[in-house]
Image (tube, rainbow, N blue to C red):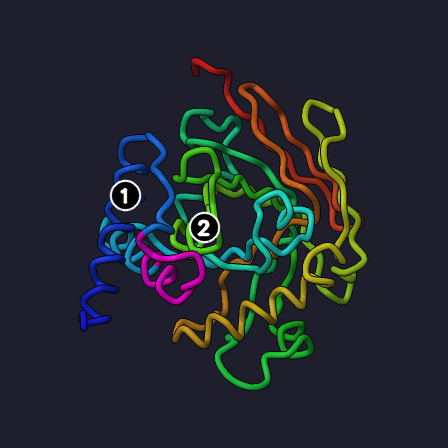
């Protein structure tokens, strides 16, 4: 009988090599589920952790997490049925950029979200919605620019988990509210591309409540031995369908009553 530990090590190494090559060359790779399987999420997170470890070894600084696949509309778009999470790094934050280089990413798409900034660790306790609500310092409107190193977005859950939950970049607005000032579940989102309405939704589209998504992440992160900490940013997950990026497009999300957030992509040749 083959040694399962050694087999897992080989599967992890093969997936890491493919995804690292895609990121390095800018050429998307074939799916990695042929070496990880369609359902072994723990193995896929092991790939994600190894890729994050290598990124940190090159000097990247982790600043939080993103929750993915929280919206039923996005789950239908992606062909998956459960949420996942990835790691946010400081160099993914492009909030201060006037223009995002279109070719920095491979297959970019945009979604509007609520970003929570934590004031307390979420490392023990019930980790229910009441506890995570108390741990939130404030929230801001956010755009997540998702990406995939998998060619044609041909992903199953293990592909996207391994690929850092299809993370790319993110944009945070300056305007902030505390949870005493608004209710995330009741937020209403409209996303515009060059002033054309291209996506809309609300807080209830995010696992029923963005705070429920945060509670899910807190429990899941703790189960992997890497709990959420004070000061970290958490992207809640999409409030509506995601939208492909075309060169030169300006995206603006209005999330009532939280505020607005916007970004612009460069043209094809920039």
**Quadrant (top left, top right, bottom left, bottom right) of the C terminus:** top left
User: Badge 1: how crowded within 10 Å, few (<14), some, or many (20+)?
Assistant: some
Q: Residue at x 46, y 33 (%)?
A: 152
Q: Looking at the image, which residue is at 53% across and 20% down?
A: 247
Q: Count up the numbered dots.
A: 2
Image position of 19 with respect to 178: above or below:
above
35 relative to 210 in the view: left or right: left
Residue for point 61% across, 57% down: 236
The residue sitting at 76% across, 58% down in the picture is 204
Helix, strand or loop at mark 2: helix
Mark on residue 241? none
Point out residue 24 in the picture as x, y percentages from the top left corner.
27, 36
Which corner quadrant of the image does residue 48 belong to?
A: bottom left
- The magenta segment is 35-48
Where does the N terminus fall, quadrant-wise? bottom left
Q: Position of residue 43 (x, y in %)?
A: 35, 64
Q: Which residue is mark 2?
A: 160
Any magenta on residue 43? yes
Taking the image as shown, residue 221 lies to the left or right of residue 246, namely left
Q: Which residue is mark 1?
A: 18
């Amino acid at each position: 009988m083959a040694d399962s530990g050694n087999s897992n090590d080989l599967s992890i190494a093969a997936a890491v090599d493919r995804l690292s090559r895609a990121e390095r060359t800018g050429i998307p790779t074939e799916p990695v589920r042929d070496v990880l399987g369609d359902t072994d999420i723990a193995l896929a997170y092991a790939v994600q952790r190894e890729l994050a470890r290598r990124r940190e070894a090159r000097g990247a600084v982790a600043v939080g997490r993103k929750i993915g696949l929280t919206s039923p509309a996005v789950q239908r778009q992606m062909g998956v049925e459960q949420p996942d999470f990835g790691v946010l790094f400081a160099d993914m934050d492009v909030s201060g950029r006037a223009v995002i280089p279109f070719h920095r990413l491979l297959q970019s798409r945009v979604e509007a979200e609520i970003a929570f900034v934590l004031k307390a660790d979420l490392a023990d306790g019930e980790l229910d919605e009441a506890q995570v609500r108390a741990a939130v310092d404030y929230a801001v409107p956010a755009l997540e620019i998702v990406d995939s190193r998998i060619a044609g977005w041909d992903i199953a859950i293990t592909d996207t988990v391994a690929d850092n939950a299809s993370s790319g970049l993110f944009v945070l607005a300056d305007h902030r509210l505390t949870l005493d000032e608004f209710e995330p579940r009741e937020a209403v989102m409209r996303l515009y591309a060059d002033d054309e309405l291209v996506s809309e939704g609300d807080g209830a589209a995010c696992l029923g409540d963005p705070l429920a998504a945060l509670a899910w992440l807190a429990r899941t992160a703790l189960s992997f031995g890497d709990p959420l900490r004070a000061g970290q940013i958490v992207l809640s997950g999409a409030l509506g369908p995601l939208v492909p990026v075309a060169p030169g497009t300006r995206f603006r999300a209005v999330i009532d009553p939280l505020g607005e957030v916007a970004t612009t992509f460069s043209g094809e040749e920039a």
